[in-house]
Image (cartoon, grey):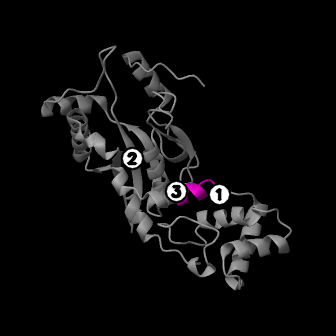
Amino acid sequence: MAKRSLSWTEDKIAKFLKEGRGQGEGANYQPWLTIHDVPSRGLSTRQKGNKTGRIHHVLSDLERNYLYLLDWSDHVIDIREQYPLDRERTLQIAEELGYRHPMDIATQTPIVMTTDFLVTVRREKEVMYIARTVKRSEELENKRTIEKFEIEREYWTQKNVHWQIVTEKEIPREVCRNLQFVHGYLMVDEETRQVSMELLQYLIVSEEESLSEAFRQFEHRNFLDPGGALLCFKHLIAAKYVSFDMTRSFSKRMKLEEIKLSYNNEEMRRWAT
């Protein structure tokens, strides 16, 4: 699909508002920006969310990885990416701070600022919002970038929403690789789900030493094609029936004793929120 015009005008902003951009929650939310609205650097992707059941538009590899963490966390209820800030308010804040508001250079139109993620979280019995901006650490050395972040920070402070910048230093790379490995395997057909449950039962009693040996035996016993057990195991991980040390790269050579049948999500919660 061809990219839309990248220039901003008042008519374009009005059109986006009429389309419902930046509005709704859960499956009904529409991000202000999609991958078709920004310059392509080969990093923009569309990811199906398990929390929301809709397609998320992420504009960098860091945003994608952070989305994996949010989608995995038991604390997170809803994820709204590319969330628009009220333009009248950001214009006023910029003036109060003495900073230039972001403008479209070609049209001299004040643009609608966005926050990468507005997240709804539940902590014990309390439901709250947190706002997160995801950027590489080197971008924080740019004075103009910091000015924009100050506008964003003040916007959320006035709304009593905790805002924070997340860089690659706070996003565990190996964990995200493992989450990418199983992302998309939560929702499976009934036959796959049933076979996955049978695999779980088999792993509980198996005397094989490694996962690869257990997979091979399970596939032989159940007349599965090679790789069938691994597919089911991905579902078991995605559904949190089994777990392993997510800071280590997954390998079928893992010993069965390294695989846990109970799941503690505290570390994942810490990383994501």
**Chain-order first, disc 2 or disc 1:** 2
**Which residue is the site of mark 1?**
185
Report the mark closest to the observer, 3 or 2: 3
Q: Secondary structure at mark 2?
A: strand
**Which residue is the site of mark 2?**
118
Gap in angstroms between the C-alphas marked 2 and 1: 25 Å
Q: Residues within 10 Å of mark 2 (few under 14, many from 20)?
A: many
* Residue 215 place in picture, x, y as percent: 73, 71
Gap in angstroms between the C-alphas marked 3 and 1: 14 Å
> What residue is at 38 percent from the left and 64 percent from the top?
270
Q: Secondary structure at mark 3?
A: helix
**Chain-order first, disc 3 or disc 1:** 3
* Residue 52 place in picture, x, y as percent: 54, 50
**Which residue is the site of mark 3?**
177
Q: In the rendered image, which quarter contains the N terminus?
A: top right
Report the mark closest to the observer, 2 or 1: 1
Quarter occupied by residue 60: top left
Q: Identify which residue, 148 or 229, lies in the foreground.
A: 229
Magenta region: which residues? 177-184
Q: Is residue 26 magenta?
A: no
Residue extending farthest right? 223
Amino acid carrying mark 2 in the image: Leu
Amino acid carrying mark 1 in the image: Tyr
* Residue 193 place in picture, x, y as percent: 73, 64
